Structures are given as structure tokens and as C-alpha cells.
Amino acid sequence: MASKSHTAKFPPDLYEVMIARSTALGYRSVSAYLKGLVRYDALVQGPHSITLPMSNLPDAAQDDIDGQLLAVTKRGVGERGQLLSRLLERVKSVEMIPGEIVRTAPK
């Protein structure tokens, strides 16, 4: 079956993560890596309780998270539990208020 083409744009840090991870995992191309991610998601059918809230954050907050993910990727050692916990706390602390860009909730 012929593949359908789709164009997507990625922030610079997330793009670097995508290149690094696709190479580290042994995918023959970034396209193969992205197809692998979609296939994995289709197999698992789990909720996106971490990445969905991130997708609703303002671009600047997403860029900050992408920068942290790039730093972890460059170190080559995932911080699954620790980084994940910190990112979740950051997502929870951001309030969307009409008329304002972002306000961090008091700790």
C-alpha cells in the first residue's frame, strides 16, 4: 500500500530529540521512528496523561520542557521517574487564565 505524505513542524529542541532518539534506537530514518511511535501508541492504547496536558500549555512552557528533554537525551541516560515527576508537577502548576499568558500557581 502506498504511504500518504504528511508534513509536521517541530520546535528545534524537540527536533534534536527526535533525531537523537531515532538514531540511538536504530531506526533507519526519522520517518521510520515516527511510524514506530504511532504503532506503539496504537498497540498500547493508553491515555496520554502526561503529553496531552503538555500540549495544552503555552508555547514558551512547551519549549522549556523540550529543552529539558533535550538535555536528558544528550546525557544519554533517561530519568524516567525523576524527570517525569518534575514535569508533571510543572504542568500541574501552570494555570490558564483568560487575558493572561501563564501564571504559576503558588507552591
Image (cartoon, rainbow, N blue to C red):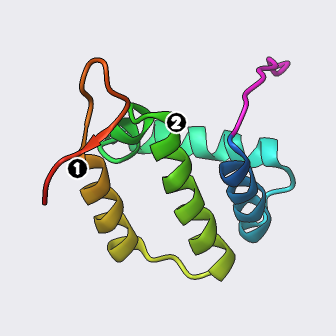
Q: For marks 2 and 1, give the CA distance.
A: 16 Å
Quadrant in which the N terminus is drawn: top right
Q: Position of residue 5 (x, y in %)?
A: 82, 19
Given residues 29 and 83, the one toward you in this image is: 83
Report which quarter residue 101 is drawn in. Answer: top left
Is 47 within the magenta? no
Q: Residue at x 73, y 27 (%)?
A: 8
In terms of secondary structure, what is the magenta stretch mainly? loop
Within 10 Å of disc 1 (Cα), the crowding (few <14, some 14-19, many 20+) is some
Report which quarter residue 107 is drawn in. Answer: bottom left
Given residues 31 and 61, the one toward you in this image is: 61
Q: Which residue is mark 2?
A: 59
Please state which amino acid type lies under the numbered disc 1.
Answer: Ser
Given residues 78 and 94, the one toward you in this image is: 94
Q: Secondary structure at mark 1?
A: helix
Q: Position of residue 13 (x, y in %)?
A: 68, 54
Q: State whether residue 47 is above or below residue 68.
A: above
Q: Residue at x 56, y 82 (%)?
A: 77
Q: Residue at x 40, y 41 (%)?
A: 54
Q: Which residue is mark 1?
A: 93
In the visual, does 32 lie left or right of 58?
A: right
